[in-house]
Amino acid sequence: TPARPAAVKPATLASAGAPVSADGYTAVGFDKLSGYSFDLPDEVVAPAKDKIAEASKRTSEQIPVLVKSFDQKRIALKGFMLPLKVKDGLVTEMLIMRDQSMCCYGAVPKINEWVSVKMVGEGIKPVMDQAVTLYGKLHVGEMRENGYLVGIYALDGDRMAPPETL
């Protein structure tokens, strides 16, 4: 009898070429998080109440297995900060984006080009116009508010590395 082909295993962090640091954080970049097309028709963004399950399935099917493998993992992500909530001078909620276009030029980023971040603890100092690296636990999958798709990535932020200077 012919040999059966081996089962294809989902991509792992190691096979993704994502190094894990000594403190347990995996370096993940927007090259992977935004390295695919994501189609956003109205029936995915704002489905009728009886079509949310179908919209959720379409959303999930568009996220590559490699990207899904980062779900619930501790990652280090480099990007540009857009503060959303500030308390006592510290940013508690923000977007971390692939590039500065939304911050500076008003270009609308694609849904896979930003990560919604809520800092655990008191927050971090705002850093504008410089790339920062945030560390935390990544969540991959749709996020809906009142039925509307508002994102596909969220991060529970632990800390931020100091910005890199040129």
Image (tube, rainbow, N blue to C red):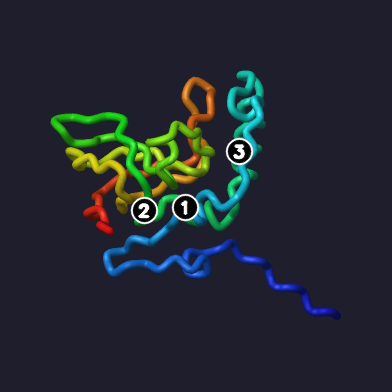
Looking at the image, residue 65 sits to the left or right of residue 125; the answer is: right
Q: In this view, does 10 lie above or below 93?
A: below
Q: Residue 30 carries which label?
A: 1
* Most foreground residue, 127 or 15: 127
SS label for mark 3: helix
Can residue 139 be seen in the rendering of this structure? yes
Label 2 or label 1, whichever comes before in sequence order: 1
Q: Name the residue under label 2.
A: 78
Residue projecting furthest to the right: 1
Crowd rating for badge 3 (residues with CA inside 10 Å; few <14, some 14–19, many 20+): some
| Label annotation for residue 124 | none
Q: Distance between the residues labelled 2 and 3?
A: 24 Å
Mark 2 is on which residue type?
A: Lys
Which amino acid type is shown beneath numbered disc 1?
A: Phe
Q: What element carries label 1?
A: helix
> In the rendered view, would you say 78 is above or below 125?
below
Residue pictured at 51% horizontal, 56% vertical: 32
Q: What residue type is labelled 3?
A: Thr
Expressed as whole percent of the image width and height from the top left, the position of residue 134 reads 31, 50
Quarter-of-image position of residue 1: bottom right
Side of 148 relative to 106 (left or right)? right
